[in-house]
Image (spheres, rainbow, N blue to C red):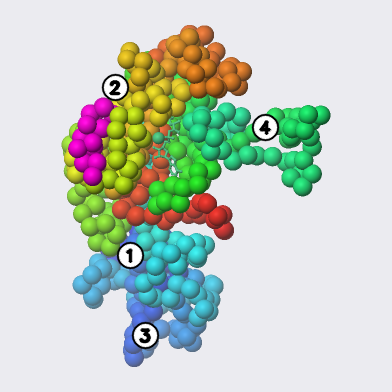
Amino acid sequence: MKERINAIRNMEPSDALIKAEGWVRTKRDGKNVTFLELNDGSCLKGLQLVIDKSEFRNLSILDSITTGCAISAEGKIVKSEGGEQGVEMACEDITLIGECPSDYPLQKKRHTVEFLREKAHLRARTNLFGAVTRVRNTMAYAIHSFFQENGFVYVNTPIITASDCEGAGEMFQVTTLDLENVPRTEDGKVDYGKDFFGRMAKLTVSGQLSGETYAMAMKNIYTFGPTFRAENSNTTRHLAEFWMVEPEMAFCDLYGDMEVAESFLKYIFKAVLDKNGEDMEFFNSFVEKGVIETLEHVINSPFEHMTYTDAIKILEKENSRFDYPVHWGSDIQSEHERYLTEQVAKRPVIVTDYPKEIKAFYMKMNEDGKTVRGMDVLAPRLGEIIGGSEREYRYDVLLERMKELGLNEKDYWWYLELRKYGTAPHAGFGLGFERVVQYVTGVSNIRDVIPYPRYVKNADF
Ligand code: 4AD
Ligand code: MG
C-alpha cells in the first residue's frame, strides 16, 4: 500500500507493509541504527525511518542515501521510541530513485530567504516554503469554496486587454512587432494596425471591468487570476505579477460590499486554522510570534470602520511621526495604514469615502461631489490588502467623470453601455492574494509567498 506521509503519520502501528516515497531531509547515522527523515510535501514534519542495521536487507545502499535524494522505503509502522512523533517506520527496504550529490544547496542548516530566492526551483523542499505552499493552497481552495457556497459564479476575465482599469498607466505591453524595426504610419507613429491584435494591447491590471459585465447578467460573480503591474515599486508588498480575487455583485452597495469582504476574509483565515494546524504552529514559532492568536482574534471581532476624513483627522495629530505628513487630500501610505491598524484599531480597518482625486474613475460619486464610495481593507503589518468600491452606475455621471480625467470614452464604449442597458447599483473589490498569504503566514516579504516572484529587474526561473 502506497500512502502520503501525512496519512502514514496518522496510522496505527500494525504488521502491514507500508510504502513511503519522498525526499530525504536528514540522515543520522549511528553505530547500529540509521535514522532518515523522509518528506513528501504533504505535511511539515517528515516520517522518521528507522533502519536497524543488524536486520536491514540492503545495507550497501545506505552509503548512497544522502540529504536530498529521492527514495522509496518499505516497512512497518511502529510506535515511536522518541517522544516527539507518534509513529515511525521500522524500515525493511529502501530503493534509491534519484541520488543527490554533495553539492546539493539545501544541506541541513538554516538558509536565509535571500539565498533561497536564488534557489527558487528547490526552495519548496524547505520547511518554510513547504508550509507557505500548503497554506496558499488551502487559501485558494477556501476562496473558491466561499464564493461557491454563496452563489457566486466563477468567471475567467481576459489577461490581454486594451483597457487600463485603474487608469494608472502601469501596464505591460503585449506585442509581436519587431522592436528593432517598428512599422510606422505616415505621420511617424507606431503602426499598431500591423501588430498581432491590430491595436495596442496590454496585460491586465485587474479583471474588474470585464467582471462587471458578467455581474450585470449573473448577479454575483468572482474572478481569481493573475494580474500585472509595471510599478517601479521595490518593496516587500509589491509584485509585477500577482494573483487577484475580484468579486462583483449587482444590486449591491458599499455596505453589502464591505460585509462580503469581511466575512470572506474571516472564512479564509478560519479554513487555514482548521486545516493547517502544524504549518501555522511553525509560522507562529519561527516566522511571526502570535500570528495564530491574532487570526483567532480577527475572526472573532468585527473590523473597525472609518471614513477617509476621520482617518485623516486621526493621522494629522501624529504627523510628526510620519515620513510623509498627511492632510485632507493626500494618499494614505503604508506608514499611515500601519499606524491606523497597529496603533489605533489593533485589528483590520476598513477606510471608506476617499477623495475622488486619489481613486479610480469608476467609483460612485458621493452627494458631496468630492468623495467617492471606495473602500480599502487595511491589515496590521501590511496595510492595504483589499481595494474595492461601489461602482458609478449612472451613465451621465460616469461619462462626466471620464471626461474630467481625460479618458477616451471610445475605449470604454462597452463599459458605458452597461449603464445604458439595464443599469443597476453594483459593487465589488479586489483582494491581493499574495498580500493575504503574507498576512496569514506572517512572512514579511511578498517574494516569498509566490513560487516564482516577478519584480523590477527580476524574472528569473
Ligand atoms: O486596489 P487595487 O488597485 O484595486 C483594483 O485593482 C480594483 N480594480 C479591484 C476591484 O475593485 N475589483 O488592487 C487590489 C488589491 C490591493 O488591495 C492589493 O492587495 C493588491 O491588489 N495589489 C498588489 N499586490 C501585490 N503587488 C502589487 N503590485 C499590487 N497592487 C495591488
Ligand atoms: Mg488600491
Q: Earlier in the sequence, mark 3 or mark 2?
A: 3
Tell me how far mark 4 sits from mark 1, CA to CA.
51 Å
Q: Residue at x 52, y 41 (%)?
A: 229
Say what amino acid the circle numbered 3 marks.
Asp
Say what amino acid the circle numbered 1 marks.
Lys
The residue tagged 4 is 200
Extreme residue in the bottom direction: 31
Residue 170, percent from left and from top: 53, 38
Tell me how far mark 3 sits from mark 2, CA to CA.
62 Å
- Left/right placement of residue 98 relative to residue 13 reads right
Badge 2 crowding class, 10 Å Cα cut-off, few under 14, some 14 to 19, many 20 or more, is some
The residue tagged 3 is 29
Q: Which residues are magenta?
A: 306-320
Q: Is residue 186 magenta?
A: no
Tell me how far mark 3 sits from mark 4, CA to CA.
63 Å
Q: Earlier in the sequence, mark 4 or mark 1?
A: 1
Q: Which mark is residue 255?
A: 2
**Secondary element type, mark 2:** helix
Q: Quadrant of residue 106?
A: bottom left
Which mark lies nearer to you, 2 or 1? Answer: 2
Q: Quadrant of residue 280?
A: bottom left
- Left/right placement of residue 159 relative to residue 126 reads right
The residue tagged 1 is 45
